Amino acid sequence: MSQTSEIAAVDTAAPVMVQSPVARLLANRSMRDSTLLLVLAAIWIFFYFATNGTFLTQRNLILLALQTAIVGLAAISAVMLIVTRNFDLSVGSAVALVGVVVAVLTVKMQVNAFVAVLVCLVVGVLMGVWQGWWVTRMKVSSFIVTLAGMLYFRGISMIVTNGATVAPLPASLKQVATGFLPPIWSILLISLAFCLFAAFRAFELKRGAELGTVGNFKAALTRALLPSLAAAVAAIWLASSKGVPYLIVLVAICAIAADILMRRTRFGVQLYAIGGNPEAARLSGIDVDRVIFINFVIAGLAYGITGVALTARVSGAIAGSAGLFLELDAIAAAIIGGTSLSGGRGRVFGALLGALLMGSLNNGMSLMNVPTFYQDTARGAVLLLAVAIDQFSRRRIATSRARIR
Amino acid sequence: MHLLEVRSLTKVFPGVVAVDNVDLDIAPGEIVALLGQNGAGKSTLIQVLSGLYPFGTYSGDIIFAGAPLRCRSVADAEAAGVAFLAQEVNVAPDLTVAEGLFLNNEPSRFGLVDAQFRMARAKLALKNFGVDIDPALPLGDLDLATQQLVLIVRALSKNARLLILDEPTAALTDRETVRLFERMRALSARGVAIIFVSHRLAEVFEISNRIVIMRDGRISGAFRTSETSRDAVVDQMIGATPTHRHANRKPRTGGTALEAHDLSVFDASGREVANRLALAIGRGEILGLFGLLGSGVNEATMALFGAWRGAVSGSISIDGVPAKIASPVDAVGHGVGLIAQDRRDGLSGEHSIYDNAILANLDELSRYGFVDAVKARRKVMDLFDRLKIKAGDVDMTVGTLSGGNQQKVQVVRWLAAGAKILLLIDPTRGVDVGARAEIKRIWTELADAGCAILLVSSDAEEIVEICDRAVVLCNGRIAGTIDGADLSETRLLKLAAGV
């Protein structure tokens, strides 16, 4: 490229302005995930001291993970939708409706739990099809479609149950949300997951080295594996005494599947392209409506999964309050995790970190006996701060031009 | 045997017949230049061919490679072997170059995108085209011309049999254009037919085998390139012999309107893109600012308008009085207007001409916070008539106007705001020859009326034609100033290239 070579020639001679280290840190894309991790670490250290160590015990961290699980599940589909500039305000109500379905089937109609779960997944998918149809065929904005969904899904839940709680769920179903995978199996599963990941990365980087796109195979592999190795070790430590809750296994599977879908498949590339610039996507021959429709269907599948998990966790369907404000928590988690409201940018694991950050605030403040009102205020402030940081770094990126690395 | 046969193609928009009963045959390996003024129907024609308007929204037949082509979408057209490159540069800023190159065409293995293979192929494709970009960079980090190059590489890398390019060279430098033409010739030698729209006649004569000219939705003439001349082509486009070079104006020198001292501009990473520039524009003067891509002309102009997002140092004075211009609000307050390179940056396409036109002058057109609609409308309508905007009325949506008319709406906006200093960045990009001449006439009139105009252009011919004086930048520094009598394309290009 002609102009970069010209610029490069100038670059050495031109005086370089001093930039604040914070600004530089935020301008760097790969650093942004780490920024979130640093914030999370700071919050954890604060709570560690504020609660005399209670916060960072195995027991509390597992509790924290369980508390975060439902929001985490909802945040995964929130990321996928926001990346394409769509919103889903109906998650909370849709989840409540699925909960009603599973509870009515198992408690009132004595249907086999496995069949009931399958029915719930189908019901979730149908809700996704319904909303996707309105958005892509009738061209109603997703904001409105899901706002309407938020109202009538909740309304239908109340009509079906007449506002009463349907409980208790059969033990087998409760087990999903409250049971633990035994420690030995947990450790094996974590190790297996890590090995699969390592093998995949090694395979991919090796291919890159053969094709000449990866310079130093060993260094690249080390860089790719170190963070996940640390995560695996931490997970094994957490699982060592009681094992991993089934619910967390479910969240992990969903997150990994969604991450692969978003970052490794053609469908995923199309999602990001549509969010980044719908016109460019259309001109590239992408069937934008079809992709968005599928996006909503996947969100529907997520209603099914989340609805069953939530209902199992509280052991019954409470049409009035189940999943209340879940959509807002999910969107907040996604945004804190670096998803851009203007589309085109966002990662599943970022959203999970965002959910974990908000969960940590709840959990830590509860341990400190901070009144609920103060908790809400603090969470609001964190959300605002996170979005401000996002905007700030986005501006930095927008103004930085092509430069030689 | 023709590759493409178009038979009595007609496309009607509400109230307008955009393409009127057009027949067109294109042979394999042929490079056809499609010319015509704004609203002549060229864009609509190529958009129909590339599947942007689905089958059934137009009448007539398209036969491609012996079979009827009935596309429901761009994807259908691509599958059939028709690749299209739009005029406006549209990319998703967060995708990497490699992702952008193979968007919707990703190599995959085992159902997953083969990212490494894609990276390798991207490197190869860029190298084959002679572009040195890191395929791992996000597209949003590249400038407009480089984004355009990526899109061109993308269109070329698809195994298309018909390639349709809408003004592919508008954002490119001469060197990049030469490379694009090399690739086009190579494709043509392989039997790929190319239709391209351009407003640069020199290029048209350099690259095309055949020139097809449209006027008012019909094909008004078709020539073998070797058997015609520029004059004949322009005559066909306009329908009459145009007035040639603008007569040399005697600029009225009424004192300095805008002066910049030691103007240095830095980008977000702190690199200096313009170094201690000294610029002065007199009242009634048209000053040209010329430089190749990366010379810092655009950045310096954005800085003058207070719209540059990086750091700026130096001093600016207006009418001899030091002025602090830290934001466009300040600039507008000082009577400075900017017409941006990219029309989408300057206009809101979904709003009407009226809404766009009053935007810069809301304070003056309002009383007690309410817009004085009567006064505002009268003002906009006066200017609308004066600039001869081709649209039904001032309530037309700007997005439906042609490039030249959109440009005029921007001029109206600043005139309504009473701007005395106009900064123009590549204002004729994507504007056809006829409208260009008209817009240039308007600027000359404005200068005669006492406006100071800074014309930033990468088109040397345009600078020579219209400017009283030109400053040339090279690598962020002033390489020289050329006065009216000595202005020539060769001098401009030599200074800009640092020869």
Image (cartoon, rainbow, N blue to C red):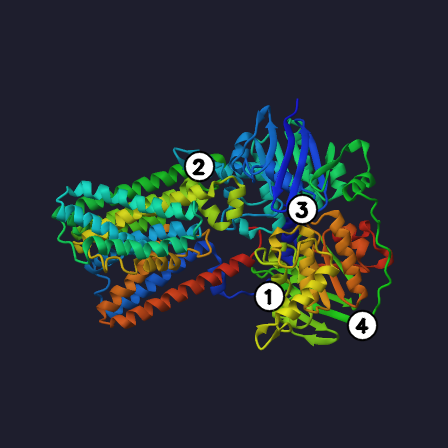
Q: Are marks 4 and 2 on the same chain?
A: yes
Q: Which chain does tag 2 point to?
A: B
The spot of residue B73 in percent (x, y) is 52, 37
Q: Left of B156 or right of it: where is B207?
A: right
Q: Position of residue B49 (x, y in %)?
A: 60, 35
Check chain identity for marks 3 and 4: say if they share one: yes
Q: Nearer the viewer, mark 1 or mark 4?
A: 4
Residue receiving disc 2: B114
Between the residue at mark 1 and the residue at mark 3, the CA separation in whole angstroms equals: 27 Å
Q: Amino acid at mark 3?
A: Leu
Side of A240 where B285 appears, left or right: right
The crowd level at tag 1 (other Cα within 10 Å; few <14, some 14-19, many 20+) is some
Q: Is residue B313 visible?
A: no
Q: Earlier in the sequence, mark 4 or mark 2?
A: 2
C-alpha distance separating marks 4 and 2: 63 Å
Q: Earlier in the sequence, mark 2 or mark 1?
A: 2
Which mark sits nearer the N-terminus, 2 or 3?
2
The answer to whether marks 1 and 4 mark residues whose Cβ atoms lie closer than 8 Å is: no
Real-space CA distance between mark 2 and mark 1, rounded to the nearest whole angstrom = 41 Å
Residue A66 found in image quarter: bottom left
Of pointers 1 and 3, the one earlier in the residue sequence: 3
C-alpha separation, residue under disc 3 versus residue under disc 4: 36 Å
Callout 2 amino acid? Asp
The disc at residue B172 is 3
The answer to whether marks 3 and 4 mark residues whose Cβ atoms lie closer than 8 Å is: no
Residue for badge 4:
B255
Is residue A132 in view?
yes
**Secondary structure beneath label 1:** loop
Q: What residue is rendered at 63% in x and 66% in y?
A: B358
Q: In which chain is the residue bearing label 3?
A: B
